[in-house]
Amino acid sequence: MILLNGLNEPQKEAAKTIDGPLLILAGAGSGKTRTITYRMAHMVSNLGIPPERILALSFTNKATKEMKERMLELIGSTSITLSTFHSLGVSILKKEAEKLGLSKNFTIFTPVDSIGVIRSILKNFKAEKKFDQKLILSRISFLKNKGIGAEEFASSEFFDDDNAYDDAIEFVYREYQNKLAFFSCIDFDDILFLTLKLFRDNPDIAEKYSRIYQYIMIDEYQDTNSLQFKIVSYLTSTHSNLCVVGDDDQSIYGFRGAEISNILNFHKTYPEAKIIKLEENYRSTTPILNLANKVIVQNKKRRMKSLWTKNDSGEKPTLWAMGNPDHEAEIIAEEIRNYKKNGGKFCDIAILFRSNNIAPPIEDGLRGLDIPYQYIGGQKFYEKKEVKDLMAYLQVIQNPYDEVSLRRILNVPTRGIGMVTLKKFLDKASEEKASLYRIMEANPALEPKKEKAISAFIELIKNAKRDFKTLSLPIAIENFIKSLNYEGYIKDQYKENPNQAARRIGDVQGFVDSARRFTKSKAKEISLKSYLEFVCLQDSQDNNKDKKDNDELTIMTLHSSKGLEFKQVYLVGAEEEILPHKRVIKEDGEIEEERRLFYVGITRAKENLFLTYCKERTIYGKKCNRNKTRFLVEIEEDKLYQDIDRTNFGHLQKEDIEKYKKNFFSDLIKDMKS
């Protein structure tokens, strides 16, 4: 027997409700996974339901693994099908492949495979302009997740007759699917697309699997898209034993196709559905939950619920107004260092932000104080392609004999210096036992057709060497990037994807800002050599870090943080045009999803929550005044957070600020009396 005494009353009720449709609205930190695993254990051990009749679906392998481990602890072993949607789809397609004209031994294309096929198809598509292969693949992925096949695209609402890209996509989509069929392959998006097609075209097969899986549970139901919704409808065609678990307040994946309407309208799809709310929070303190509840209640498209906890301790969340991103990064790094000095652990801390372009100053602030960190869901700044390109250039300017760096940037931006030309110079260098750079400098005419390009490259490096001796580090880097026309190169590379180009150009500007921060640091020597040593030394320390020592803080986007929790959280960039994002504001987009994203960030914190915003940011080279996010402005009268202006007190800690204020007013009163 499995005892349910360890569950609270709503959890116990959810675990005991087995037959018919059930919606478990599980707020953040409310023991959702515990509830659903006990529910399955109760079904098998207490009610005698055959485990092979139970199907539990989640969205990630990590969530599936956690459920399996918990089930093993509860009942020793399990034959329950615990799976992701895609794993289930593959399993079904392998068994029913012939119904779709597939080989049972089909393979699944990787994105790299898909790009290669699309590249070859585009060679046969006659057009005046070039098309971004990744963008086309992304568009095909979008269409498949909307359930739109290659033959249906042209007549769908998503096709635009006047859009040259849509003409290309229609051609590529058809040919791409033909190629996949010829190779006996499918891609990742085909897994669910073809599963739905299988059920739709073969109702008897859908009925077969519905009878196999008589009890179905779905975790994170708010993240389901229209394709998954329809597949589940087929799987429940012979019964209505469907339990879905989720939180509409944490629906933050609309950009991936998730449809919040699936959970909001569950009672309309299944009128007889029972709804149970899990509102007791086991993660955060009361002050943090008070702020979270007040923020999310502003949303109109939601089911009413309010998180509460028995943990009444803790301080109010704190909002810090910072001067600019450099000041923000410096203060946060100092606060984290002091937390560690006072006995805390780095691994208990997370720094969260809306988008990855917020990260570079934060990373530099952490590096400056030797604070170890891991970057989840994103590339570390100095590992990005554009940054590595520029670092390679600086390495060659500092040391022309660095052949690895030289070979990386020799044809970036494109100069027509390919492998054939390079081989001639390498052979000459080997013959004369000289460096590649020296041979290029002395013999630019070794390859007559490339003499001009080689000479221009050598002159570029020489001019830069002079600049770095006479100009400040950031100015020299900025001038060099302009002489290289590197931003023009990026725009040309991504001309069909301006958003991608803008992000990468932002990384280039971030690189200049990094040098500027280094110049303002306490380093004894400010030079190109010392800057390169600083960056490379930090990277070396990152790479050689003792794997056993995992005391490192975590930085990540808010999207990546869902499902995680930390004792202390810094939610950076709580300001207009960051959160909510300027694109959402400009396009009159889904502000409520941005508010849900803010809510997710708040509810990651267990004990302490710090929110920050900057009064000024440099955007495209221009200093702009900034304001705190509307999500805080609209509730500021409730006094649910402390509002502290850190720009007036520099690096003082909170207790020092209060002392400073007290002494200031005390001295002022004395002066007035005298």
Image (cartoon, rainbow, N blue to C red):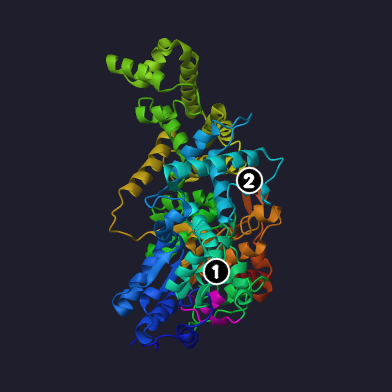
Please tell me whether residue 373 is drawn above or below residue 520 in the rendered image: below
Q: Is residue 643 left or right of residue 477?
A: right
Please tell me whether residue 449 is drawn above or below residue 411 in the rendered image: above
> Whole-percent x and y of residue 294?
63, 74
Q: Residue at x 46, y 56 (%)?
A: 99
Please tell me whether residue 10 is drawn above or below residue 159 in the rendered image: below
The answer to whether residue 566 is visible is no
> Whole-percent x and y of residue 303?
62, 76
Please tell me whether residue 382 is drawn above or below residue 253 in the rendered image: above
> Whole-percent x and y of residue 408?
41, 30
User: What type is the residue that disc 1 sits on?
Assistant: Ser
Mark 1 = which residue? 233
The answer to whether residue 110 is visible is yes
Secondary structure, mark 2, is strand
Range of residues picked out in magenta: 272-289
The answer to which of 405 and 513 lies nearer the viewer is: 405
User: What type is the residue that disc 2 sits on?
Assistant: Ile
Q: Quadrant for residue 674, please give it.
A: bottom right
First-in-chain label (1 vs 2): 1
Does the magenta run of residues contain 590?
no
The answer to which of 666 and 580 lies nearer the viewer is: 580
Quadrant location of the N terminus in the rendered image = bottom left
Mark 2 closeness class: few <14, some 14–19, many ≥20 residues within 10 Å = few
Q: Which mark is residue 274?
A: none
Mark 2 = which residue? 619
Q: Residue at x 55, y 69 (%)?
A: 233
Mark 1 closeness class: few <14, some 14–19, many ≥20 residues within 10 Å = some
Q: Quadrant for residue 227, please give it.
A: bottom right
